[in-house]
Image: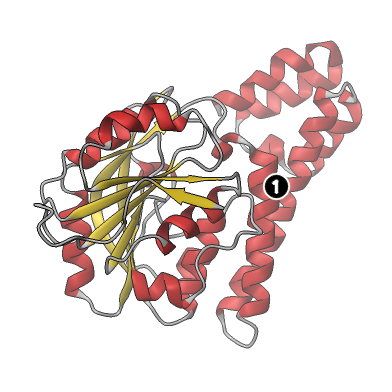
Amino acid sequence: MATQSGDMKDEPGAGIPAAAMTIIIPAYGVGAMLGDALDSVLAQDRPDWRAIVVDDGDSRVAGHVAPYLADPRIRFLQTDNGGLPTARNRAIAASDTPYVALLDGDDILEPDFVSAMISVLEANPNAGFATGDATFFGADRVGELFSAYCPQAGPPTLEKLIRREFNVFGLTAMRREAIDGIGGFDTGLKSSEDLDAWIRLLSAGWDLAHVPRPLARYRRREGQMSGNTPVMLRTAHAVMSKARDHLAGRPEAAAAAEMIVRIEHDMAIEEAFARVRAGQVRAGVADLIRLGVGTRSPRWRKALLLMRIAPFLAPWLLRVRERT
């Protein structure tokens, strides 16, 4: 169920330019940070955008978006809680521009985001979506680039995307006919729904356009879904299993199968860490050694050795994981 604060269509005489792009902003649990996101939209260097803020069942969003609704280009979509993929799909369905873009309610767009994305999509009629780099800010990694942690080695291909050799930063822009053509985001996924959509867009024959410079700022903070490793691994496994089956008979299916094996290995490591945290130190450390965690760095080798000798040190030594 969704209700809108106004008509989403452009109206003659409204005093605003016809829109080329709608920016979709799910805003569940972001509080006053939504203001930073909306300020960055208002600062865009071309004015022919619309923005739809979706509360996804968070009643607190209304108060934060209210001061911005005086701008007729910004609309508020009140919905029940359906999760991020559902919120995005609802907002896309409520828009009517040829391009749509994604902005999380706690992140920030650079002033040339809209102009750069539209330019690169217009330059290639077969480009179904476009991505750029991003700069971290907030809790850690301040000033560092997304591409330093998640490579964007071009040119982007379906196999590179599956193997995570080319990583799409989540604040993308899409051609409407492309995202509509694959049925939108998979509402059955708790996370990694964007990776699933990018795989399906490329497998449908669309190209991915890339702007090799930061077009957004990504806020690092506690409690983000991206920091929940077990959930991220489970959904990544689901996405790669879906890709392997969908791509059966194509060479990229083998890449998806290889990634499934890698993810299962990482899931086993997470289970071993969970055993250590639960007090099953000797069994957990034995599994970590068997799984090769000790080969990551000399610091890890020393930490695992100490855990075996003095299990009571495990809670303190596990902090090494946050520093490697």
How many numbered circles are shown? 1
Would residue 242 be found to the left or right of residue 206 on screen? right
Location of mark 1 (residue):
266
Q: Which residue is at 16% across, 64% downward? A: 119
Q: Which residue is at 41% across, 42% downward? A: 104
Q: Which residue is at 80% across, 20% downward? A: 307
State whether residue 163 appears in this view.
no
Would residue 305 be found to the left or right of residue 254 on screen? right
Question: Looking at the image, which is closer to me, 67 or 173?
Answer: 67
Q: State the scheme by which the image is colored.
A: secondary structure
Work out which residue is located at the far bottom of the displayed protein and give it. 249
Question: Looking at the image, which is closer to me, 135 or 76?
Answer: 76
Question: Looking at the image, which is closer to me, 299 or 11?
Answer: 11
Q: How crowded is mark 1: few (under 14 residues within 10 Å), some or many (20 or more)?
A: some
Question: Looking at the image, which is closer to me, 203 or 106?
Answer: 106
State whether residue 147 appears in this view.
yes
Coordinates of residue 241 in the picture (x, y in percent): 69, 67
Coordinates of residue 66 in the picture (x, y in percent): 33, 31
Coordinates of residue 32 in the picture (x, y in percent): 39, 24
Coordinates of residue 53 in the picture (x, y in percent): 38, 44
Would residue 283 be found to the left or right of residue 131 on screen? right
Quarter of the image where one finds residue 310: top right
When the figure is inspected, residue 22 is found, relative to residue 126, above or below; the finding is above
Quarter of the image where one finds residue 186: bottom right
Type of amino acid under label 1: Asp
User: Which secondary structure lies at badge 1?
Assistant: helix
Quarter of the image where one finds residue 58: top right
Which quadrant, please, contains the C terminus?
Answer: top right
When the figure is inspected, residue 214 is found, relative to residue 126, above or below; the finding is above
Q: Which residue is at 37% across, 45% downward? A: 5
